[in-house]
Image (cartoon, rainbow, N blue to C red):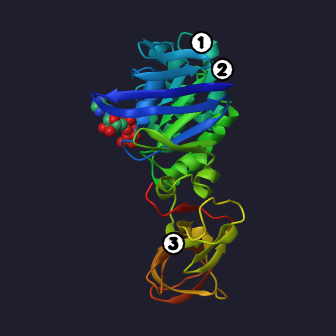
């Protein structure tokens, strides 16, 4: 059974809809990530789940219990929900142990201490019991904030852009660490973020949001490799579209030659013009390749390099290559395609 059910909810600010007919479900033990640009409604959905935002239509249930519907709302403090805020909000005058125990301070002291020590062990900060927040790094503070939210054992944990204030390397590492902690504690969680890497690293499922709606709710793999629409393909990951003309049985003629889709069937008539998505990992820099191109940009990323390449026609492609291959700007090179499956959308606007 789903632990969190958000069913067709709508929220408005004044006469402007912030969420419209918005639905998703999260099952027990699952981590869901909501991914979307600034202003798409991520904070509003968290506020609605927490009980701070009235809903105009629809229902929110947690563990089968009704939390919100129009004209009805369980008080925020009565909801079995924990929250990790963007700014971590640790109390500077309290020790790490006291911060973690905030939400369980009415329990017997010995029980509090047991919980605090267990969580400190899980977050790998067993030796920080008596330290103060300013004596911790940003990443360590983040883990303490997580432990504090986990201490009262909420049925559901919400994380609002949890790593926004951290630098990119730490963000990447922490998203995996936090995922491990959530899995180890059997937590059910919803994380909202506008960083794709964070959503992919943390979420079992990802909801791609735009303007108060979910465009696709799926695994990170499917969101990246099988986007359901051109909009999702453009919002998530890098890539370019090239024109393909549909021929028989999923074969397309393109300026890169004929490409074949063995996984999807197309009901469009032969001759339909489609846009085919080429991700940087679909394009190989390959001295034996049949396509010639010129390097126009390169972005060195350490373990790999992202190249922008121009074909004779002017079409630009992206290719990701091991950084051992070091091509120069304006260098001529050869390419081949490694298309495991195709993502193609009709040319007509959506
Ligand atoms: P960000 O990533 O920048 O935090 P978000 O995805 O969390 O953005 P929300 O804060 O949920 O977006 O806002 C959704 C929409 O509702 C935005 O257009 C925003 O301007 C509007 N909005 C949010 N809060 C209010 C408010 N209190 N009054 C009026 N409009 C609001």
Q: CA distance from mark 3 to mark 1?
A: 65 Å
| Residue 114 marker | 2
334, 181: nearer the viewer: 334
How packed mark 1 is, by other alpha carbons closer than 10 Å (few <14, some 14-19, many 20 or more), is few
Confirm whether residue 151 shows in the render.
Answer: yes
Circle nearer the N terminus (2, 3): 2
68, 345: nearer the viewer: 345
Confirm whether residue 337 shows in the render.
Answer: no
Q: CA distance from mark 2 to mark 3?
A: 59 Å
Circle nearer the N terminus (1, 2): 1
- Element on which disc 1 rests: helix
Q: Is residue 338 left or right of residue 55?
A: right
For the N terminus, the image quarter is top right
Residue 220 in the image, given as x and y percentages of width and height:
61, 49
Circle nearer the N terminus (3, 1): 1
How packed mark 2 is, by other alpha carbons closer than 10 Å (few <14, some 14-19, many 20 or more), is few
Pick out the residue farthest to the bottom.
332
- Element on which disc 3 rests: strand
- Element on which disc 2 rests: helix
Residue 210 in the image, given as x and y percentages of width and height:
43, 45
Identify whether 53 is placed above or below 293. above
Query: Circle 3 is placed at which residue position?
Result: 242
Residue name at image x 51 percent, y 72 percent: 243
Ligand 1 located in image quadrant: top left
How packed mark 3 is, by other alpha carbons closer than 10 Å (few <14, some 14-19, many 20 or more), is some
Identify whether 116 is placed above or below 298. above
Residue name at image x 50 percent, y 57 percent: 230
| Residue 147 marker | none
Residue name at image x 66 percent, y 27 percent: 118
Query: Circle 1 is placed at which residue position?
Result: 109
């Amino acid at each position: 059974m789903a632990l969190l059910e958000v069913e067709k909810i709508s929220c408005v600010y004044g006469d402007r809809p912030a969420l419209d007919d918005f639905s998703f479900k999260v099952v027990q033990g699952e981590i869901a990530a909501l991914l979307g640009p600034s202003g798409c409604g991520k904070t509003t959905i968290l506020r609605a789940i927490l009980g701070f935002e009235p809903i105009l239509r629809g229902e929110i249930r947690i563990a089968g219990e009704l939390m919100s519907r129009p004209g009805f709302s369980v008080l925020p403090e009565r909801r079995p929900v924990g929250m990790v805020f963007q700014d971590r909000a640790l109390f500077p005058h309290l020790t790490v142990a006291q911060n973690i125990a905030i939400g369980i301070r009415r329990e017997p002291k010995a029980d509090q201490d047991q919980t605090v020590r267990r969580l400190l062990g899980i977050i790998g900060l067993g030796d920080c019991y008596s330290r103060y927040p300013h004596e911790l790094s940003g990443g360590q503070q983040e883990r303490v904030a997580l432990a504090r939210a986990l201490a009262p054992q909420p049925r559901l944990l919400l994380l609002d852009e949890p790593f926004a204030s951290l630098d990119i390397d730490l963000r990447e590492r922490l998203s995996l660490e936090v995922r491990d902690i959530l899995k180890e504690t059997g937590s059910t969680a919803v994380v909202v973020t506008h960083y794709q890497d964070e959503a992919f690293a943390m979420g079992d499922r990802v909801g791609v949001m735009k303007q108060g709606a979910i465009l696709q709710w799926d695994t990170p793999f499917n969101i990246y490799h099988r986007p359901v629409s051109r909009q999702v393909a453009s919002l998530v990951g890098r890539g370019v579209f090239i024109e393909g003309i549909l021929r028989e049985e999923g074969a397309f003629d393109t300026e890169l030659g004929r490409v074949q889709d063995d996984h999807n069937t197309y009901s469009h008539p032969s001759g339909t013009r489609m846009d085919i998505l080429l991700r940087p990992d679909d394009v190989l820099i390959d001295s034996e390749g049949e396509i010639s191109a010129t390097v126009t940009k390169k972005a060195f990323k350490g373990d790999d390099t992202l190249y922008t390449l121009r074909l004779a026609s002017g079409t630009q492609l992206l290719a990701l290559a091991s950084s051992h291959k070091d091509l120069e700007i304006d260098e001529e090179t050869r390419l081949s395609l490694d298309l495991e499956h195709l993502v193609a959308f009709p040319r007509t606007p959506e």
